């Protein structure tokens, strides 16, 4: 009597169907393959990885550039003459593109983990190409119009480096599952050795990465200096229109130690804060001549300038997304501020106004370089401040007592040198807590900020860790990661390790796994199955011949037409009938 049933039964694989269907539109089983990925598809996989890497850098850049979004909008305004928040469209497209490419990367890694052939659908290829070209265009354009902002990347790594290292080690540890699976499927020992060596080299580089990580916040808590003094840059421009009395009042309410204002001079010699009105709406006040909306402040007298509205644009454009949080009273007040958008300065008129204001000279920081000698002779008490970085000895020889620079123009070493030379340093514009914390740990005495209301709520650096504590975290992270990697490799390659250590003598042929997921392509596995089945059929025929005609007749009578031993193919799948003979 012959019993028979299929040697291979296919079950529904919904997750695998979704994986290959979404990635390459291979929804049917016969469309999938365990064969090696073609060179063309390997090239597209590299393009996908490149696109993901560039988008990761692009996203990180704009995440950290949040401190300077307003500066970027001013760059666009100076180029186009129209005020708009250009960061909105950039952030929206970046979020969509990064999410899409990350999703494709996850699907590609899923194919590798499942041993499936990579075959990116042509629609996804168009999407990847569009994302790659858009990202490259954005990188080149940003480098041309806002190239100095790239300095924020190494500065931000001082705040995020230790945490990015932990994340990178976690990602590298997770990749061990894929690498171990590839090692288990590899047919040649040389391929296995190369995969293991490449992966372990990359992992070792990640483990040793903290040797190159430096941060001023890696310090003993006892060496932490008092927080930097906060100066209101143009007042508090997130709470009121910049360079207006309302903005200065708001900054004083936030307990700033000083105010920084840009000064322009009217045609009749009246100094005024350098604010930005909405000239497009006010050109009718200048005799119906719209071309005057772009004229310099020096072409208008004080009476004309007082008629301009310096707050209406603030309510309409909402440059910092803070108008909704303002009270109705503040909105009405902001819409009735006066000023002018263009900066110009006449030294004599400004100096005379300062001297007549009654403000103590020691409380005024004088930054213009021109006619500095004449200014010092007239007002010796002014704090001579430079906006250009020079060696401390040269600054002292010129009578400079303060230095005001952009936050990316002074390193931690230079900050210590200026402090040793008794030069007071102010860095601007510092708006985000993470940047304020880095400068705090660096020992900066003061910062100029558009957001004093935010920095005032930072009582302590965002993070502070002693070198010994960080070494413990670093070593513990590496050890845990390495232990997990070893466990994954042992688990994934258990059968291969057991076979090599036990030897062929103890190997049971019945344990052969006829599965395409074990170290062979689907074509090789099918050939192996056919050889085993045909070998079994040949052995059966020889046994039947030795039993004589009677036994052959008996066996023939026990086998129906539809139950004959057969090997047939349907839709590319092999079904084999041939299970056990009972006599």
Image: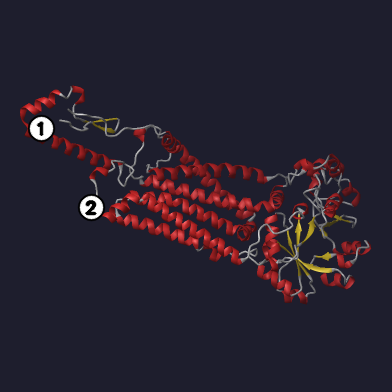
Q: Is residue 559 above or below residue 324?
A: above
Q: Find residue 435 and report its image quarter.
A: bottom right
Q: How is the image coloured?
A: secondary structure
Q: Relative to residue 81, is residue 563 drawn left or right?
A: left
- Residue 242, position in %: x, y? 80, 51
Label 2 crowd bin: few (<14), some (14–19), many (20+), radius 10 Å: few
Q: Earlier in the sequence, mark 2 or mark 1?
A: 2
Q: Residue furthest front?
A: 583
Residue displayed at 90% across by 56% down:
270
Who is closer to the viewer here, 14 or 319?
Answer: 14
- Residue 218, position in %: x, y? 63, 64
As measured in the structure, the alpha-carbon distance from the residue carrying label 2 to the one carrying label 1 is 31 Å
Label 1 crowd bin: few (<14), some (14–19), many (20+), radius 10 Å: some
- Asked whether residue 287 appears in the rendered view, the answer is no
Secondary element at image label 2? helix
Residue displayed at 68% across by 70% down:
414
Q: Relative to residue 206, is residue 344 drawn left or right?
A: right
Q: Which mark is residue 504?
A: 2
- Residue 388, position in %: x, y? 73, 67
Secondary element at image label 1? helix
Q: Relative to residue 412, is residue 328 drawn left or right?
A: right
Who is closer to the viewer here, 221 or 97?
Answer: 221
Q: Find residue 565 and report its image quarter.
A: top left
For the residues bearing labels 2 and 1, Cβ distance under 8 angstroms: no
Q: Which residue is mark 1?
A: 544
Q: Residue furthest left?
A: 548
């Amino acid at each position: 009597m012959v019993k028979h049933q299929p040697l291979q039964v296919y079950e529904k694989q919904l997750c695998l169907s979704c994986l290959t269907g979404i990635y390459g539109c291979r929804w049917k089983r016969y469309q999938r393959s365990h064969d090696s990925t073609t060179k063309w598809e390997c090239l597209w996989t590299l393009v996908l990885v490149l696109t993901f890497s560039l988008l990761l850098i692009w996203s990180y850049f704009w995440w950290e550039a949040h401190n300077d979004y307003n500066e970027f909008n001013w760059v666009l305004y100076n180029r186009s003459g129209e005020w708009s928040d250009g960061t909105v469209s950039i952030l929206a497209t970046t979020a969509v593109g990064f999410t899409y490419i990350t999703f494709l990367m996850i699907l590609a890694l899923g194919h590798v983990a499942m041993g499936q052939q990579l075959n990116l659908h042509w629609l996804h290829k168009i999407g990847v190409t569009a994302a790659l070209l858009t990202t490259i265009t954005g990188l080149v354009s940003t480098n041309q119009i806002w190239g100095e902002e790239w300095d924020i990347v190494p500065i931000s790594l001082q705040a995020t480096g230790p945490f990015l290292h932990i994340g990178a080690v976690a990602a590298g540890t997770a990749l061990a599952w894929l690498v171990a699976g590839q090692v288990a499927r590899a047919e040649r020992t040389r391929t296995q050795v190369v995969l293991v060596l490449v992966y372990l080299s990359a992992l070792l580089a990640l483990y040793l990465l903290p040797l190159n990580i430096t941060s001023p916040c890696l310090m003993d808590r006892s060496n932490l200096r008092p927080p930097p003094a906060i100066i209101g840059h143009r007042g508090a421009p997130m709470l009121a229109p910049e360079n207006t009395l309302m903005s200065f009042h708001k900054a004083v309410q936030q307990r700033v130690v000083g105010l920084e204002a840009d000064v322009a001079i009217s045609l009749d010699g009246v100094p005024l804060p350098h604010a930005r009105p909405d000239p497009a709406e006010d050109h009718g006040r200048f005799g119906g001549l719209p071309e005057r909306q772009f004229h310099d402040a020096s072409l208008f007298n004080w009476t004309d300038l007082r008629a301009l509205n310096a707050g209406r644009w603030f309510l309409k454009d909402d440059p910092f997304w803070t108008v909704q949080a303002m009270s109705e009273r503040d909105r009405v007040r902001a819409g009735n501020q006066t000023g002018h958008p263009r900066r110009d300065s006449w030294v004599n008129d400004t100096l005379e106004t300062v001297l007549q204001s009654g403000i103590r000279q020691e409380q005024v920081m004088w930054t213009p370089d021109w006619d500095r000698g004449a200014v010092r002779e007239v007002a010796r008490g002014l704090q001579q401040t430079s906006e250009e970085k020079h060696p401390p000895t040269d600054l002292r020889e010129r009578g400079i007592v303060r230095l005001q620079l952009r936050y990316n123009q002074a390193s931690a070493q230079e900050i210590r040198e200026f402090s040793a030379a008794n030069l007071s340093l102010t860095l601007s514009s510092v708006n985000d807590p993470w940047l304020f914390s880095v400068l705090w740990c660096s020992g900066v005495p003061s910062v100029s900020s558009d957001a004093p209301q935010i920095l005032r709520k930072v009582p302590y650096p965002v993070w502070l860790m002693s070198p010994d504590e960080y070494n413990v975290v670093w070593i513990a992270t590496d050890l845990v990661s390495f232990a997990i990697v070893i466990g994954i490799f042992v688990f994934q390659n258990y059968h291969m390790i057991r076979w090599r250590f036990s030897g062929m003598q103890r190997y049971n042929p019945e344990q052969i796994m006829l599965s395409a997921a074990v170290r062979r392509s689907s074509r090789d596995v099918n050939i192996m199955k056919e050889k085993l089945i045909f070998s079994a059929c040949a052995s059966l025929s020889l046994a039947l011949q030795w039993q004589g005609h009677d036994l052959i007749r008996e066996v023939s009578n026990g086998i129906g037409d539809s139950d004959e031993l057969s090997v047939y193919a349907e839709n590319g799948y092999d079904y084999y009938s041939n299970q056990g003979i009972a006599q």
